[in-house]
Structure formats: structure tokens, C-alpha cells
Amino acid sequence: MGNFFVNLGKGFIRSAVNQVGRDGGKVISNNLYGNAHSTPIRNICINSTNQYFDEITNEIVSPNELRERASAEGFKPVVFRNKTIVKIICYILIVPFSFLFLPAIGLFIWGIRRLTKKYVYMKKTVTTANYVTDRRYKTGRRLNGYSNEDIAIKVPANSYERSALMKAGLIYIALSLFSFYIGKISWNYINESNKEYEYTKFIEQADQEKERIEWWKSIDSIKYKEKMDEFNLKYQKAIKYTEEHKQ
């Protein structure tokens, strides 16, 4: 008899815990989707720890089972959120900034994320009720029409979707390497342009610079020699650089 009451007590506690989790899930789901569609999948709810469970059996629903039920409820898998043309436009817009190397780094990280991604989202458009505050009603609010909203759940990717994600990841990585190459060329070009401008300007102002150095000749011969040696070295480098780049 004692064991009977012990088992009965355990069963009661287990049921209470499950009920709390189920009620908590309903609260979260209602807050997310509204009263018109309290749970995205029939007889499935989400608890406070973001686990899906069956409202009838109180059992945790596995990711694969969740995907099967979502498909039966009309959810469609979405592997990529943005269309290809949008991605192409975005890439064209960031190419001019390749010299900063940020596009290459961002694309590389995005590619790694796609390579290692093992889940997709399944989406469905549902009609939800819109309410506004109105104290004339007992509930304190009144119905103000309906609107269509997209709801989504995360499910494991199948082999086809994993293959698509991996291909996309490799493309992103290839684009990151290409962007890095473009960035390196751009960076070298900018540096060479700056160097050419600096040397050209130095040659044009060589006489004025030499006159300023001559001022040290009567004041400090050692300082004068140091500055003149530095001037001659830089002048020779400037002449050599400009002659080489004229060819």
C-alpha cells in the first residue's frame, strides 16, 4: 500500500511539472502568434526552454518528427532567405570597398557559417487577429481585423538542403578570396599612387628643401651633414622610382 501512494505521488508531481511546461509553452506561443493561432503546429507547443513537445502525450518532439509534422501542416522549407539577384546586387555594392578587406572577411565568415549550418527554417503564412485597447469590452480590447503573418520554426536540414548550403558556403568562400585579391590589388595601387605623388612633389620642391638644409651649414655642421645625406638618399630614391615607372 505504501508503494502505491508513493507512486501515486510521483505521478501527480510528474503531471504537475508537465502541465506547468505545457502552460508555459502556451503563454509563449500565444505571445508570439496571438490567440487566432496559439500554436504553429497542431497539438505541439513550445516550453520555456524552447523545446517542442506533444500536448497530448507530454513527450518531447524530436527535430525530425517536428519537421514531418510541420510539413503536414503546410510549412515549407526555406534554405535561403534572400533571392540570388539581391545577393548579386549586394556583392556589386561592396566590391568598391574591397581595399578595406572587410568584404573579404565578412564573406569568408559567412561562407564558413553556411558550410557548417545543419538546419533550415520552415515557414507558413497564417491569419492572425489584431486587437486594439477598448474599455467598453469586458476583455479590455476589441477585434480590429486580421492580417497575414509568416511564422517559422527551425528544423534539421535534409541531405539536399545540406548540399545546397555547402555549395553556397563554397561560393561565398571563393568570392571572399576573389575580394581579397581585388582588395590587395586596390591597396597596392593606392600605395603606389601615393608614393608616386610624394616622390614627384619632392623632386619639384627639391631646390627649396635644399635651401632650407643649407641654413644648418653655418650653425651645426654635423646636423647639416645628416640632413644633406638624408636629402640625397631620398632624392636618389625619388629619381629612380620615377624613371622606373615612366617605362
Image: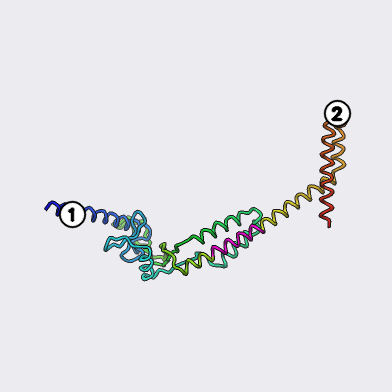
Q: CA distance from mark 2 to mark 1?
A: 105 Å
Q: Secondary structure at mark 2?
A: loop
Query: Residue at the location (87% across, 42% down)?
Result: 207
Question: What segment is highlighted magenta in the picture?
Answer: 168-181
Residue sitting at the far left: 1
Find residue 223 and report its image quarter. Answer: top right
Image mark for residue 92: none
Q: Which residue is mark 1?
A: 7
Is 196 left, or right, of 18 in this rendering? right
Residue sitting at the far top: 219
How many residues crowd around disc 1 within 10 Å: few (fewer than 14), some, or many (20 or more)? few
The disc labelled 1 sits on which kind of residue?
Asn
In this rendering, the label closer to the viewer, 2 or 1: 1
Query: Residue at the location (86% across, 33% down)?
Result: 215
Is 81 left, or right, of 65 in this rendering? right
Q: Nearer the viewer, residue 50 or 42?
A: 50
Residue 69: x, y in percent?
Answer: 35, 68
Q: In the picture, which quadrant includes the C terminus? A: bottom right
